[in-house]
Each structure stands twice: as C-alpha cells, then as structure tokens.
C-alpha cells in the first residue's frame, strides 16, 4: 500500500462510500429474537459506522451516501454530523426510505439480524452525486462490496474509484459480504455470512486491481478470491493487483499481507464477547486511523484489534465505538482488562468523551420550580393551574430571545414535568439545551419523581434532555442522612450512564444547619467523585473567589472532560448575582449560569396577582434574561 501519510494537507482524511442505515438493537438479551419487546435505535450501516468511528478517533471523515426524506434519514445525518463527520455529500433521496436493520443478541455466537433494505436510499447513490474535486479532497476513499450488488451503484463506485486513482487518493475496499444483500439468502437469514457465488466473485474481481488496501474476514476473502480455501483465494486476490490484504480473524486478531515480504500476525485482545456485530467496522476505523497517522502495519493492526475488542464487549456498534482517549487507555492496560464494559475507568472515559455534548457556555433560564410557585399561587388565591400557564409564558419569552440574539446556541432551560410537560416538549423540539428536573422538591433525603428507581422512567425521556437533580447536601450532614442521599445520587448516576444520558447535579450546601466555608463545596464534590458520580454538569451556589481554585482543580483531577459548572441564583438580586459572576468569570470551568427566581420571581408575583398582563410578563422576562446573559458575557470577556 502506498504511504498513507501522503496528502495530509487535503481537507479530508477518508471518504466513506456506501451503506448508511438505522440499527434497531433488541434490548432483551439471551432469548429468542421473536420475544424481543423493545429496541434501541443507533446509527448503522458499515460505511456510516466507519465514518463515525474515524471521527471519534479524531480523523476528518466524510460520508458519501443517500438517506431518505424522513425522520430516520435526518437521524442518520444528524448523528454523523454531531460526531464530526462531513455530511456535505449525504444526499436526501425523495423517493426512497432509509435502510433499517433489526438486530438481536440471542446468546453466545447467536446474533440474528434482519435487513430492511429493499430499494433503500443508500442504494440510490448515483454517479452524479459527486465529482473529481470532492474525491480528490480526501487522502483515502473507503468503499464496500455491498454497493457492487446493483448496476447503478456499481457504476457510482467504479466512477469514484477511477477518480481516486487519477487524483492520488488511496482506495480501501471493505469486502463487506452479506449474501442476503445480494439476493443469495432468504430475507430472514441476515446472519448468514457466506454463500458461494461466481457472479459475486466476478463483480468483485473488477475492482480488485484498483485497490490499495483490501480488508475482509476469511469468508469474505474466499468470495473475493473465488476459492473455498482462504490461502488460495488470497493468492488470487494478490495476483489481481497490488493491494495490501488484511484478513480479520476475530478474537485471534488479524493477518496483514503486504504486496511484498512476510505476513504480519497481529494478535487480538482476549475480552469477553457480548456482541460481535459491528466489530469489523470498528477494526477498520482503528486500522485506518493508525495508517493515516503514519503507524506501521503492526501498530495499525493493534489499533484495529483494540477497537474491535471494545465494541464486542458492548451493546450496539456506533455508540460502542471508542474515542482516541479511551482507546489509548485500553491499550495501556489491555492485559488486565477482560471486561471493558465493567472497567470503571474505561466506562467513565467512554461516557465522558462520547456521550456528552459539551458547550462553551450556557445561559439557562431555570423554571422547574414547583413548591415555590405553588406557595405563590396559594398566597394570592390563584389556582395551581395558573402555574402551567405561567411556564408557557416563560417559554414564550425564551423563544422571543432566541429570535433576537446572536447567541441562540447558548440558550438553555430547566423545566419540570409536573407543570411544564408541554413546555418540555416545545423546548426540546426547538432544539434548545433542555434540563428536566427529576427530584421531588425539598426532599431531604433526596426522593425522585415519579419513583426512586429511575431507570425505567428515564427510558421514556427524549435522549437529548439532560437529567437535572437537586440535592441538599453538606459533607458534615449526619451519617444516616448522608448515606441515604449518596445512595440515591449514585443510583441515578449509574442509570444515566447506562442509558447514555447527561446528568446535571445541583448541590446546595447552605441553609442546612452547617457552616459553609471555602472548602465545603469542594469537599462535597470530592465525596461524590469518590463514589463514582461524574456528572456532565455541576450546578452550584456562587462560590467565593478563594473557593474557586479548589473546585476547578478538583474537577480537573477527577473528570477533566466535565462540561463545567453552572451558577444558580436562589432568588438573589442582580447586584448579588453580579458579585458571584465576578468571582466565577476568571475560572474556565464555570460555563455560565442556570438562574430562575432571580429572573422570574418578581414578574411571577405580579402576574399571579393580576397586575401584570401576559404580554408584559413576557417582555419583562425576556429583558431580564437578556440582561443577565449580557452581564455574564461582559464579565467573561
């Protein structure tokens, strides 16, 4: 294979041409596929998985495919884009649906899957979907065998390959042989990995002379080479061209056959296997990552094997793909890790570097208050139903601000379900950062809504809603109280991690009978970190300037990938908030605020009394919100 480090100045590292789909993974494991009740939705399709995996490893990957003009297609595009994949050439096909794959884990070595790909969008890829400039913008073009299965997509593949050869772009061929996708197996036989076919071999043979790298399992090598014996088939592939051939051997690792010289055996990593589906896509991501970085074949093969080992230990493919930080951690300790899915450090790194959606700054209007608004309504004789109406007006103010300010991407809200269910849906659909309250207001020890075992209720939340939990906690609380609170928070953090959800933990230590000094908050956070609680966000009372270094150093010590701290308000007047903002502004770990009553407290009282109209309260809330955001931006600048 030609030096993969060539062309480093090009704007893209790899263009992945081929399958892009939605994987629906059964969540009940170890039983018949017929008995699966619920499915988890992930990005799927071999090419999309590779593009996604490369982006997670820090490469500039791009996707060349089509998706349907429907929610599944938009999900594929958004998931790729969020990972950092260039989707400029993910076309929307107005006539075809995005492919779906249903997959199960029925037992050891039993992974049934059903492809729903009849006339699917990615098989609508056409030769006029790209040009020479696009193909030449990348160091590599990665293609798959599936797209040789129809005349139209084969024509698109061959055009891309010819352009790549002319532009000096390396061609990588993932054989990716699924008999069912060539019409050689029954529709329900998606797990079948090999059916001999002279026609498939003939079509593959046309592309072999153009390839720089060919990757496949032993079965795929046999279909590409047209022989029942793997070594004989590999020799036939070698005779056809100049490519380096990589044979994937599962748990045994891989064997790399350069055009000249001895074969290179790269051992695998002995981990316990949950799910082999997607391991090959992970392997190719790691292999290409290594080669593009200038690694030799042995090192690149080890990266590929390590990526595969991490993925086979987890549920799903795309969400299981590692970040580079996580991959390096695994490689440093691989001999001691048999269960990557249960290694605390790896689990924490995977969560921190792949599932969180970091923001530079957030300006959050928190109006998840329930008890305070119930008391306010009662004090003026207003029915509690008025609270729901008021929260809708707060949402009106947020939407007005979003239309008028240049920092729309920094807008956030925290809302509750009790009085804000419609607002939650509205803000989520609007694309704002949305935190959703889970605690029962005022509970101490902490209690959760709708029940303390939170995993199943959380499953019904939209995945992009952040779990917000307030705990009244002081590190000097009585032991029994402290242990009860810690147990509840620890269970919630575990549920959030297993479901891939972000957690915002709000810790309030003041007003609970113990003195609060410059060490109190840091002591509380250290205790939660020692329990394995690593929230994506902390929400804290404004610390003193002298307390901030302890807090920042502590977070960087335990979780350098933490999204940051948001400051709460506790109904403080703007002058006191300004002092808190001034103390926080020099510290990078503070990313903004999540303030409620300081913004809506007085307008809510006047509106509940009937002295402020709906329009006036929206005006007042919007002005206060913008003014507070402006204050933070001024001090931070």
Image: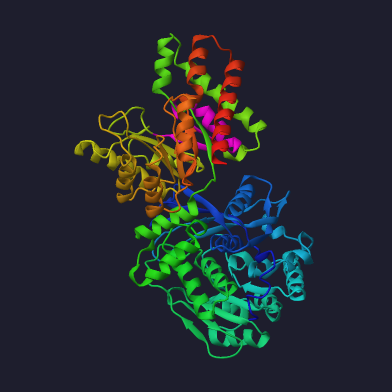
The magenta segment is 411-438
The x and y percentages for residue 564 are 46, 45
The x and y percentages for residue 330 are 41, 67
Magenta run includes residue 426: yes
The x and y percentages for residue 588 are 49, 47
Quarter of the figure that contains the N terminus: bottom right
Q: Is residue 68 above or below residue 385?
A: below
Q: Is residue 527 left or right of residue 322?
A: left
Farthest residue to the left: give it: 479
Q: Is residue 500 left or right of residue 198?
A: left
- For the question of whether residue 569 can be seen, the reply is yes
The residue located at (63%, 86%) in the rendering is 238
Magenta run includes residue 10: no
Is 405 in front, or is 426?
405
Farthest residue to the bottom: give it: 261
Farthest residue to the front: give it: 546
Q: Is residue 40 above or below residue 199?
A: above
Is 216 in front, or is 538?
538
Is 364 in front, or is 202?
364
Which image quarter: residue 61?
bottom right
Q: Is residue 24 left or right of residue 95?
A: left
Count of labels in the image: 0
């Amino acid at each position: 294979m030609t030096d993969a480090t060539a062309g480093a100045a090009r704007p893209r590292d790899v263009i992945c041409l081929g399958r892009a789909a939605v994987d629906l993974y059964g969540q009940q494991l170890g039983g018949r596929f017929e008995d699966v009740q619920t499915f988890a939705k992930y990005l799927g399709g071999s090419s999309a998985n590779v593009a996604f995996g490369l982006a997670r490893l820090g490469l500039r990957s791009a996707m060349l495919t089509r998706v349907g003009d429907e929610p599944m297609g938009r999900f594929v595009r958004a998931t790729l884009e969020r990972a950092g994949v260039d989707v400029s050439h993910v076309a929307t096909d107005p006539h075809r649906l995005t492919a779906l794959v249903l997959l199960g884990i029925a037992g050891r070595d039993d992974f049934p899957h059903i492809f729903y790909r009849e006339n699917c969008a990615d098989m609508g890829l056409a030769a006029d979907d790209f040009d020479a400039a696009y193909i030449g913008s990348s160091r590599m073009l990665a293609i798959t065998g599936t797209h040789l299965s129809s005349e139209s997509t084969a024509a698109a593949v061959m055009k891309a390959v010819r352009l790549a050869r002319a532009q000096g772009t390396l061609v990588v061929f993932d054989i990716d042989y699924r008999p069912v996708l060539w019409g050689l197996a029954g529709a329900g036989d998606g797990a079948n990995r090999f059916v001999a076919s002279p026609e498939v071999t003939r079509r593959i043979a046309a592309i072999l002379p153009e390839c720089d790298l060919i990757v496949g399992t032993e079965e795929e090598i046999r279909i590409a080479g047209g022989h029942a014996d793997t070594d004989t088939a590999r020799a036939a592939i070698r005779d056809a061209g100049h490519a380096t051939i990589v044979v994937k051997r599962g748990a045994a690792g891989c064997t790399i056959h350069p055009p000249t010289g001895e074969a290179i055996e790269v051992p695998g990593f002995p981990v316990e296997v949950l799910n082999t589906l997607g391991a090959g896509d992970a392997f190719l991501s790691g292999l290409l990552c290594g080669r593009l970085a200038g690694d030799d074949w042995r090192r690149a093969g080890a990266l590929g094997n390590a990526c595969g080992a991490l993925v086979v230990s987890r549920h799903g493919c795309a969400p299981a793909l590692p970040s580079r930080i996580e991959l390096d951690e695994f490689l440093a300790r691989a001999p001691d890790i048999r269960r990557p899915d249960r290694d605390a450090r790896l689990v924490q790194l995977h969560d921190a570097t792949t599932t969180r959606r970091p923001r530079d700054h957030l300006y959050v209007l928190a109006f998840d208050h329930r008890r305070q608004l119930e008391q306010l309504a009662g004090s003026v004789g207003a029915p509690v139903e008025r609270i729901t109406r008021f929260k809708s007006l707060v949402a009106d103010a947020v939407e007005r601000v979003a239309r008028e300010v240049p920092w729309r991407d920094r807008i956030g809200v925290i809302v509750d379900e009790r009085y804000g269910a419609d607002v939650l849906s509205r803000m989520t659909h609007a694309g704002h950062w949305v935190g959703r309250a889970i605690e029962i207001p005022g509970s101490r020890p902490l209690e959760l809504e709708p029940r303390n075992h939170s995993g199943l209720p959380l499953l019904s939340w939209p995945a992009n809603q952040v779990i917000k939990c307030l705990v009244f906690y002081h590190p000097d609380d009585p032991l029994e109280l402290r242990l009860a609170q810690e147990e509840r928070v620890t269970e919630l953090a575990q549920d959030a991690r297993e479901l891939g959800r972000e957690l915002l933990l709000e810790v309030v230590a003041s007003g609970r009978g113990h003195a609060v000094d410059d060490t109190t908050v840091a002591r509380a956070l250290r205790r939660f970190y020692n329990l394995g609680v690593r929230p994506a966000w902390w929400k804290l009372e404004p610390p003193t300037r002298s307390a901030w270094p302890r807090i920042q150093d502590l977070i960087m010590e335990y979780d350098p990938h933490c999204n940051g701290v948001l400051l709460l308000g506790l109904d403080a007047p703007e002058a006191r908030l300004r002092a808190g903002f001034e103390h926080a502004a020099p510290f990078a770990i503070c990313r903004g605020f999540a303030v409620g009553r300081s913004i809506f407290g007085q307008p809510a009282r006047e509106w509940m009394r009937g002295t402020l109209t709906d329009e006036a309260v929206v005006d007042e809330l919007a002005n206060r919100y913008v003014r507070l955001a402006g204050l933070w931006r001024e001090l931070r600048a």
